[in-house]
Image (tube, rainbow, N blue to C red):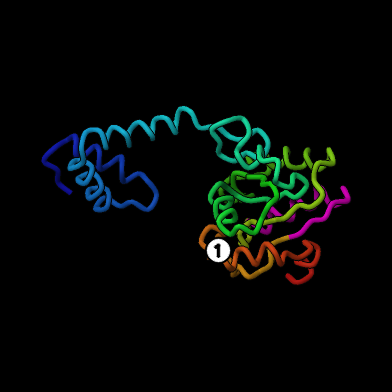
Amino acid sequence: MDFSSKLLENAVYEMSQLPGIGKRTALRLVLHLLKQSDQRTENLATSLLDLKAKVRFCSNCHNISDTELCEICANPKRDASLVCVVEDIRDVMAIENTGQFRGMYHVLGGKISPMEGIGPQELTISSLISKVKKGEIKELIFALSSTMEGDTTNFYIYKQIEKEGISISTIARGIAVGDELEYADEVTLGRSIINRIPFEGSLKSN
């Protein structure tokens, strides 16, 4: 792709580094930004810089937050004894959109994947186990995607806490095997949360 401007070429290159954005789409987006007012472009740039500089992670659940505790953890109406374990922020948003869950979350920051060099120590598993051992949790719901990595992560956590005397469940398999949680429709995901099953039962069925 030939460019008449080095500035344009640089902008297209940086835009194309975003996931799912090819060079043609990046060019279209950059040309669109060029047509916008200076204020509009400045607002976009400022919001991205603020996001990078000021965003933090909730000290309790590791969700993305503007403050030490995210809005979910700071909400006294949420059930702190019921915790849903998810991979990342996108899964929190997907479950929240169902309106069917009133507990808390624990964001792992990924899944165990030896092929990618991701072990338990790269995730927030230790802080989750710590909360369980402190007696803060009565039920843990595994809501990771039904992939080999998701199942491996579920099983690893289960083995660490199986003797702690809490209820451990997993979302019902209304979510197709291999599907990522964020792509499930809200009705299916909501029903999967409501109709969750004991984790031990899911092991026997596999």
Q: In which quarter of the image is the C terminus?
A: bottom right
Q: Where is residue 86 in the image (x, y as percent from the top left)?
A: 63, 51
Give the residue drawn at x 70%, y 64%: 194
Task: Report the residue at 78% width, 39% height from top.
Answer: 131
Closer-to-camera residue (170/163) = 170
Image x and y of residue 160, in percent: 80, 47
- Say whether residue 129 is left or right of residue 6: right
Of all residues shown, which one is farthest toward the top?
A: 53
Residue of label 1:
186
- Secondary structure, magenta segment, majority class: helix
Frontmost residue, 118 versus 166: 166
189, 155: nearer the viewer = 189
**Residue 57 falls in image quadrant:** top right
Range of residues picked out in magenta: 150-169
**Residue type for callout 1:** Glu
Residue 22 drawn at (x, y percent): 30, 52
Q: Does the magenta stretch include residue 7?
A: no
Query: In screen coordinates, is 49 left or right of 82?
Result: left
Q: Residue at x 75, y 72 (%)?
A: 205
* Residue 152 falls inside the magenta stretch: yes
**10 Å neighbourhood of mark 1: few (<14), some, or many (≥20)?**
some
